[in-house]
Amino acid sequence: MKVWKEIRGWLLSIGIAFVLSLIIGIFVIQPYKVDGHSMDPTLHDKERIYAEKWSHALGRVPDYGDIVIVDSRVDRSRSFWDDLKEHPLIALLTGESKQEIFYVKRLIGKPGDKIEIKQGHVYRNGELLNEPYIKEPMRIEPDQEYDVPAGEVFVMGDNRNNSKDSRMIGFIPLDHVMGVKGLK
Protein backbone atom coordinates (compact mmCIF):
# COMPACT_ATOMS: atom_id res chain seq x y z
CA MET A 1 0.00 0.00 0.00
CA LYS A 2 2.75 2.44 0.91
CA VAL A 3 4.57 1.69 -2.37
CA TRP A 4 1.45 2.41 -4.44
CA LYS A 5 0.91 5.65 -2.59
CA GLU A 6 4.50 6.66 -3.37
CA ILE A 7 4.10 5.71 -7.05
CA ARG A 8 0.82 7.66 -7.28
CA GLY A 9 2.54 10.68 -5.75
CA TRP A 10 5.36 10.49 -8.32
CA LEU A 11 2.94 10.02 -11.24
CA LEU A 12 0.88 12.99 -10.08
CA SER A 13 4.02 15.15 -9.83
CA ILE A 14 5.20 14.09 -13.30
CA GLY A 15 1.71 14.73 -14.74
CA ILE A 16 1.54 18.21 -13.22
CA ALA A 17 5.05 19.02 -14.48
CA PHE A 18 4.10 17.84 -17.99
CA VAL A 19 0.94 19.95 -18.08
CA LEU A 20 2.77 23.01 -16.72
CA SER A 21 5.51 22.65 -19.35
CA LEU A 22 2.84 22.49 -22.08
CA ILE A 23 1.15 25.64 -20.75
CA ILE A 24 4.48 27.50 -20.48
CA GLY A 25 5.56 26.39 -23.97
CA ILE A 26 2.28 27.34 -25.63
CA PHE A 27 1.57 30.62 -23.84
CA VAL A 28 4.77 31.97 -22.24
CA ILE A 29 8.15 30.99 -23.72
CA GLN A 30 9.42 28.33 -26.12
CA PRO A 31 12.85 27.49 -27.58
CA TYR A 32 13.45 27.54 -31.33
CA LYS A 33 16.52 26.86 -33.42
CA VAL A 34 17.72 29.14 -36.22
CA ASP A 35 17.85 27.06 -39.41
CA GLY A 36 20.12 28.54 -42.06
CA HIS A 37 21.90 31.82 -42.67
CA SER A 38 18.99 34.17 -43.43
CA MET A 39 19.51 36.12 -40.18
CA ASP A 40 23.31 36.51 -40.43
CA PRO A 41 25.01 38.47 -38.91
CA THR A 42 22.45 38.92 -36.08
CA LEU A 43 21.73 35.21 -35.52
CA HIS A 44 23.62 32.21 -36.79
CA ASP A 45 22.73 28.78 -38.16
CA LYS A 46 21.79 26.29 -35.39
CA GLU A 47 21.70 29.04 -32.74
CA ARG A 48 19.04 28.46 -30.06
CA ILE A 49 16.74 31.33 -29.24
CA TYR A 50 13.76 31.70 -26.95
CA ALA A 51 10.50 33.17 -28.14
CA GLU A 52 8.21 35.13 -25.86
CA LYS A 53 4.77 33.73 -26.71
CA TRP A 54 2.41 36.23 -25.02
CA SER A 55 2.16 38.24 -28.21
CA HIS A 56 1.09 35.13 -30.15
CA ALA A 57 -1.33 34.00 -27.45
CA LEU A 58 -2.94 37.45 -27.23
CA GLY A 59 -2.82 38.25 -30.96
CA ARG A 60 -0.61 41.33 -30.42
CA VAL A 61 1.23 42.82 -33.39
CA PRO A 62 5.00 42.82 -32.69
CA ASP A 63 6.99 46.05 -32.94
CA TYR A 64 8.95 47.16 -35.99
CA GLY A 65 12.38 45.57 -36.00
CA ASP A 66 11.41 42.75 -33.63
CA ILE A 67 12.87 39.36 -34.47
CA VAL A 68 9.90 37.03 -34.81
CA ILE A 69 9.39 33.32 -35.29
CA VAL A 70 6.79 32.61 -37.96
CA ASP A 71 5.03 29.54 -39.29
CA SER A 72 5.92 29.62 -42.99
CA ARG A 73 2.82 27.66 -44.04
CA VAL A 74 0.86 30.81 -44.82
CA ASP A 75 -1.56 28.99 -47.15
CA ARG A 76 -3.33 27.27 -44.24
CA SER A 77 -4.96 28.44 -41.04
CA ARG A 78 -3.55 27.63 -37.59
CA SER A 79 -5.37 26.34 -34.55
CA PHE A 80 -4.66 25.64 -30.90
CA TRP A 81 -4.04 22.01 -31.90
CA ASP A 82 -1.12 23.15 -34.09
CA ASP A 83 0.42 24.87 -31.05
CA LEU A 84 -0.06 21.70 -29.01
CA LYS A 85 1.28 19.28 -31.67
CA GLU A 86 4.31 21.49 -32.35
CA HIS A 87 5.29 21.81 -28.68
CA PRO A 88 8.82 20.35 -28.21
CA LEU A 89 7.65 17.76 -25.64
CA ILE A 90 4.84 16.50 -27.86
CA ALA A 91 7.20 16.44 -30.86
CA LEU A 92 9.69 14.44 -28.79
CA LEU A 93 7.02 11.93 -27.74
CA THR A 94 5.57 11.54 -31.25
CA GLY A 95 8.89 11.72 -33.08
CA GLU A 96 7.57 14.45 -35.38
CA SER A 97 9.82 17.50 -35.56
CA LYS A 98 8.49 20.38 -37.62
CA GLN A 99 11.34 22.80 -36.86
CA GLU A 100 11.91 23.53 -40.57
CA ILE A 101 8.48 25.14 -40.96
CA PHE A 102 9.43 27.90 -38.52
CA TYR A 103 11.35 30.85 -39.92
CA VAL A 104 13.18 33.41 -37.82
CA LYS A 105 12.82 36.87 -39.43
CA ARG A 106 12.67 40.59 -38.66
CA LEU A 107 9.33 42.40 -38.69
CA ILE A 108 9.40 45.13 -41.35
CA GLY A 109 5.75 45.94 -42.00
CA LYS A 110 2.53 45.94 -39.98
CA PRO A 111 -1.06 45.90 -41.24
CA GLY A 112 -1.77 48.93 -43.42
CA ASP A 113 1.90 49.68 -44.21
CA LYS A 114 3.26 50.15 -47.70
CA ILE A 115 6.64 48.45 -48.13
CA GLU A 116 8.76 49.39 -51.13
CA ILE A 117 12.07 47.94 -52.20
CA LYS A 118 13.86 50.37 -54.52
CA GLN A 119 17.46 50.17 -55.70
CA GLY A 120 18.24 47.63 -52.95
CA HIS A 121 16.80 49.78 -50.12
CA VAL A 122 13.66 49.20 -48.06
CA TYR A 123 11.09 51.96 -47.51
CA ARG A 124 8.12 51.81 -45.17
CA ASN A 125 5.34 54.30 -45.88
CA GLY A 126 7.75 56.36 -47.99
CA GLU A 127 10.51 56.51 -45.33
CA LEU A 128 13.89 54.85 -45.95
CA LEU A 129 14.56 52.34 -43.16
CA ASN A 130 17.79 52.64 -41.20
CA GLU A 131 18.87 48.99 -41.02
CA PRO A 132 22.30 48.66 -39.37
CA TYR A 133 21.60 44.96 -38.72
CA ILE A 134 21.62 43.75 -42.35
CA LYS A 135 24.57 41.64 -43.50
CA GLU A 136 25.25 43.43 -46.79
CA PRO A 137 23.45 45.65 -49.26
CA MET A 138 20.66 43.93 -51.17
CA ARG A 139 21.31 42.97 -54.75
CA ILE A 140 19.58 45.44 -56.99
CA GLU A 141 16.52 43.80 -58.47
CA PRO A 142 13.40 45.27 -60.06
CA ASP A 143 11.56 47.59 -57.67
CA GLN A 144 8.89 45.88 -55.60
CA GLU A 145 5.90 47.25 -53.72
CA TYR A 146 3.77 45.55 -51.06
CA ASP A 147 0.61 46.79 -49.30
CA VAL A 148 0.38 44.86 -46.03
CA PRO A 149 -3.22 43.70 -45.54
CA ALA A 150 -5.15 43.82 -42.26
CA GLY A 151 -4.30 40.94 -39.95
CA GLU A 152 -0.93 40.26 -41.58
CA VAL A 153 2.71 41.37 -41.37
CA PHE A 154 5.71 41.62 -43.69
CA VAL A 155 9.00 40.03 -42.58
CA MET A 156 12.53 39.85 -44.01
CA GLY A 157 15.78 38.19 -43.01
CA ASP A 158 18.83 40.28 -42.11
CA ASN A 159 20.81 38.48 -44.82
CA ARG A 160 18.57 39.86 -47.58
CA ASN A 161 20.47 38.13 -50.39
CA ASN A 162 19.98 34.71 -48.76
CA SER A 163 16.54 34.85 -47.15
CA LYS A 164 13.23 33.18 -47.94
CA ASP A 165 10.83 35.73 -46.48
CA SER A 166 7.68 37.72 -47.30
CA ARG A 167 9.12 38.59 -50.70
CA MET A 168 8.79 34.89 -51.61
CA ILE A 169 6.20 33.31 -49.30
CA GLY A 170 3.91 36.31 -48.96
CA PHE A 171 2.45 38.13 -45.99
CA ILE A 172 2.39 36.37 -42.62
CA PRO A 173 -1.00 36.12 -40.90
CA LEU A 174 -0.77 37.36 -37.30
CA ASP A 175 -1.77 33.94 -35.97
CA HIS A 176 1.33 32.56 -37.75
CA VAL A 177 3.63 34.83 -35.71
CA MET A 178 4.62 32.25 -33.10
CA GLY A 179 6.45 34.67 -30.84
CA VAL A 180 9.04 37.41 -30.47
CA LYS A 181 12.68 36.66 -29.74
CA GLY A 182 13.22 37.18 -26.06
CA LEU A 183 16.02 36.05 -23.79
CA LYS A 184 19.09 34.42 -25.28
Image (tube, rainbow, N blue to C red):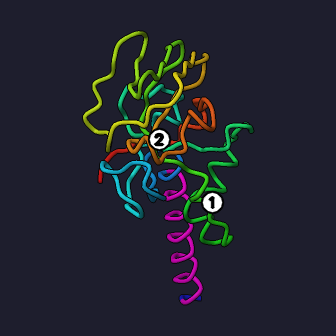
For the residue pair 11 and 180, the one nearer the viewer reads as 180
Range of residues picked out in magenta:
3-23
Q: Nearer the viewer, mark 2 or mark 1?
A: 1
Q: Earlier in the sequence, mark 2 or mark 1?
A: 1
* Residue, disc 2: 179
- Residue found at the very far right of the displayed protein: 76
Looking at the picture, which amino acid does disc 2 mark? Gly
**9 to 125, vertically: above or below:** below
Q: Position of residue 135 (x, y in %)?
A: 32, 44
Viewport quadrant of the N terminus: bottom right
**181 to 100, vertically: above or below:** above
**142 to 135, vertically: above or below:** above
Residue depicted at 55% across the width and 18% down the height: 145
Residue depicted at 54% across the width and 37% down the height: 177
- Residue found at the very far left of the displayed protein: 132
Q: Position of residue 181 (x, y in %)?
A: 38, 44
Is residue 58 covered in magenta? no
Label 1 packing within 10 angstroms: few (<14), some (14-19), many (20+): few
**175 to 27, vertically: above or below:** above
* Residue, disc 1: 98
